[in-house]
Image: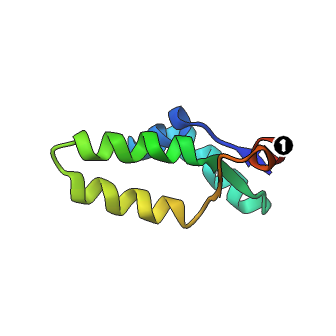
Amino acid sequence: MVGVDTTFLIDLFRDDERAMKVLEELSKSGERIATTVINMVELYRGAFLHPNTEKKIIGIEELKDLLIVLDMRIEGAIMA
């Protein structure tokens, strides 16, 4: 399992070429991709501050379906 942080997720939303390539390579390898609920909070917060909130929320929901979102329990920290 590979853990990704908020910076990487934001780079995906910005269509950063390197981030997109890494995501593609991870997907092709069958690697499970995880992030934390805290990173998701940061994405949603940014979306609610963005002028096009609805579009950003839709993007987050689509991305969320590709990820394992680890919760805030100690087990999540151990799994990361």
Query: Mark 1: which amino acid?
Result: Ile
For the residue pair 9 and 72, the one nearer the viewer reads as 72
Assign a secondary structure to mark 1: helix
Disc 1 marks which residue?
A: 78
- Give the side of residue 32 with respect to residue 50, left or right: right
Asked whether 63 or 77 is in front, the reply is: 77
Q: Position of residue 46 (x, y in %)?
A: 33, 40
Q: Residue 50 at x, y = what percent?
A: 22, 42
**Residue lying at 25% horizontally and 58% vertically, measured from the top left:** 55
Figure check: 34 above or below 42: below
Task: Quadrant for residue 61, please give it.
Answer: bottom left
10 Å crowding of disc 1: few (<14), some (14-19), many (20+): few
Q: Is residue 15 visible?
A: no
Left or right: residue 31 compared with residue 70: right
Q: Quadrant location of the C terminus?
A: top right
Residue 14's spot in the image, x, y percent?
Answer: 38, 41
Outermost residue toward the top in this view: 7
Q: Residue at x 55, y 41 (%)?
A: 38
Give coordinates of residue 21: x percent, y percent.
60, 46
Q: Residue furthest right?
A: 78
Q: Residue furthest left?
A: 51
Residue occupying the point 22% across, 52% down: 53
Q: Residue at x 23, y 59 (%)?
A: 54
Q: Residue lying at the far front in this picture: please name it.
A: 73
Look at the image and tell me whether residue 19 can be seen: yes
